[in-house]
Amino acid sequence: MTSEASGRIDAPEYSPPATPILPPCDSTLLNEKGNMQVSPALRADLLDFKAWSEILTTYGRTMRVAVALTDSQGQLLGKCHNPQPVWQLVNNAVRGRGPGCPFCITTRLPCTAVADALQTGGVVMVRDQAGLTHVVVPLLLGKLRFGAIVAGQVFDRYPDSLVLRRVAKDFGVSEQQLWELAKEQRPVSSAVLQASGDLLCALGNAFLRQRYSAILEAKLAETNGRFRLLVEGVMDHALFTMDSTGCVTSWNGGAERLLGYVEAAIMGQNFSCIFTREDIQNRVPEKQLHKALIAGRADDEGWRVRGDRKQFWANVNITALEADPAISRSFAIIVQDVTERRKIATVLEEARQEREGLQEKLLSHVSHELRTPLTAIYIFTTNLLDGVYGDLTPHQHEPLTLALDNVKQLKSMVSDLLDITRVETHKLTVEPQHLSLARLIDEVLSTCLTNAAAKNVTLRSDVAPSLPFTWADPARVRQILINLIDNGIKFASRGGSVTVASPPYVENEGFLCLSVSDTGCGISSENREIVFDRLAQVRSTTEASRSGLGLGLFISRELVSLHGGRIWVESELGKGSIFYFTLPVFSLAKLCAHVLTAANLEAGCVTLIVVDVAQVEGAVQADILLEVRKVLESCIRPEQDVLLPSMSDAEPVKTFFIIACTDAKGFEVIASRVARELRKFDSSSKLKPAISSTTLLLAPGHFGEEQIGDVAARVDQLVQAHLLGKERLQ
Amino acid sequence: MTEKKILIIDDDQHLQLGLSARLRARGYRVSCAADAISAITVARKELPDLIILDLGLPAGDGFLVLERMRDLADLVAIPVIVLSARDPTDNKKRALDAGAVAFFQKPPDNHEFLGAIRHALGETMALSTFLKT
């Protein structure tokens, strides 16, 4: 499609495609991929002939050329403006112009300049069979081809009479008339045509872009209008906007209805007027605005106040209207009245609590009522077994022992029943204390001995002698161990064994691990998943009918997790199972953590008071310790001081309590009060424990994280020293 | 040495029967009361060395008995062990606060329970060994 040799007039003559002169398309018209999305309707709208008419007519008159708008296929859109006489004469004689260039006067195929111009993005110049020249200007938005402007129908040199004669013959027009008109038409040089084509290209494309923006704006305005109607129509939500200072900038009908302010009255007012007085005093509106500024969004549920001072429970959502919080200047607020929903939720919650309360009450009552006859049976059975009513024959002894075992089982089932209710009402609690496991495990094993002996199962303890102290509830740990050991005995084969051990545990430094292993039938992998679930009963071939309530492991899991530990089982079918559970290691530093803060240490107001209680005949009596504890509790300030329970397990050292106190002045007060109270206790009570006290004053100084660690370590050393009875730190 | 006297206050006749048999076998003299009012009357008449007290009683509960005892000079020093079917969670602390020396939930472990009785009667140690300057 390059230029033809001049003189040949049977085919359109092309000028070389000009360098594209279109400015780069405005980036706002593009989507993120650089493509523009234009619907056919928008395309038609952009090339609306009527809109272009004025600019094209003006151009044509000024430049004395004919101008026409075509689509991207070269089809004429609307009429040709300012048509030139020669062209007009010939064109009138053309019957049924086919597709292609509307300007070309040719008996053959018209030119493809529109396609070429759109392809190259530049102006293309063409001379037709009659020697008339036209330029074609592409209309482009980015890479999208919309159409073209064709301008010309002028001679770019003096008309050739031979050529015109042939045209007159070919198209059946009067040769003389054609020649007269041609002579009248002033030629325009191709250089001028080219220049005016470039001008038209700039002009046309600028107009196209302007038109595109105008259409978008109109659409946006229409959308806004529709959106406004929508917002106004929402009546069950209050929708309003405010600026960054919280002043209302728009107010919908729902806001008027729900919040009771008319738009005129509220515009420009601060949105804090819908908050309660307490919220305003507590600066809640400012805090919410701040949160929305920082996070782009703030959600809240709470009381809000209507214009008539009536309160309602509101669900409020504040959204920043700019994605970037740094430039956010405006917020949209949606308020919904959820008072009814809240009422229903409250009623449901009350009903749930009442049901739970009733359930607990019922089970507590049942448990209580079951215990009374159980106690009578227990007492009579043990009386018989212990020979209170005379000696028994071995034949009588055995069934009575079995009866006692059943009583014990019933007793633990009654306890489980109550515990399970507490789990459900979240009332199951543990009271952790400083605890040595070695002795507890020995006690538990001796308790389980009878059961084990009956099944000819050996009980073993393989607990490390250096097992650290733990921070746990002795009664609950005992319960967990008994559950696991009884379970082991139940499933161990006759002549087998159950072993309690303390395997090394490194996963969590603050915890130690105990294990209970048996030589039983083992648990299949699917059962291992559910063995800790409520009412899970792993079917055993031998004792399926005697597996209790199936609550033991469930309660054990709850108790272990209340201690912060975890419980799991490893098992191999036919070889036995190992149950593991972890308990927190006792750490004085951890317990005193809220006293041993950097601020307290820096202020020099950390004091530890150690209160010793002498042992009595190898064991400190629990009731004496309780009395001492009551005295100590009366001396401390619960919100500031920490009182640790007695640490009585390690033999043969003394039991002692530590009071960690956050106030150096308080130390004197507490120390003297403790001394006084204990003296009083000494003289009034018939229980007379021997008490001495030791104080440790931590040196004030500069404390950082590291130093706190040092102090904590020193506190632990102090405890160890006391427990081992080696020395007393001053 | 004279026999130690123990008063069982419990409205369950079977418990009275079984427990008193056990205690008599151990060489204690046992008397019983079945409600809060007669409990005080019997206690003042018998002046026992130890009282085993149930919490759920007719005509007032065990706490009322404990409270009354604190006000009566002849009863204030008598140690009381509470033996109740009630849940120890709250009742144990409440009972100890009210002056009981120990709390056992029914049914108690015989070994621990009889040990506590001996301890309360001062049979396991001489109180004087507590004294230390």
Image (cartoon, coloured by chain):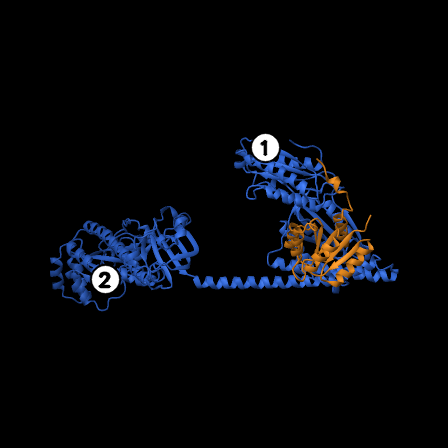
Chain colours: A blue, B orange
| Residue picked out by circle 2 | A49
Q: Secondary structure at mark 1?
A: loop
Q: In x, y percent, where is residue A117?
A: 28, 55
Q: Earlier in the sequence, mark 1 or mark 2?
A: 2
Relative placement, left or right, of A389 versus A239 is right
Q: In x, y percent, where is residue B79?
A: 71, 50
Q: In x, y percent, where is residue A442?
A: 76, 47
Q: In x, y percent, where is residue A31?
A: 36, 54
Amino acid at the residue labelled 1 = Leu
Residue at 28 percent across and 62 percent down: it is A44
Closest to the observer, A436 or A209: A436
| Residue picked out by circle 1 | A698
Closest to the observer, A460 or A385: A385
**Residue A242 against residue A170 in the figure, above or below:** above
Quadrant location of residue A164?
A: bottom left
Q: Residue furthest bottom?
A: A95
Closest to the observer, A625 or A483: A625
Amino acid at the residue labelled 2 = Phe
Closest to the observer, B46 or A642: B46
**Residue A263 against residue A172 in the figure, above or below:** above
| Other-residue count near label 2 (Cα within 10 Å), few / some / many at <14 / 14–19 / ≥20 | some
Tell me which chain the residue with mark 2 is part of.
A
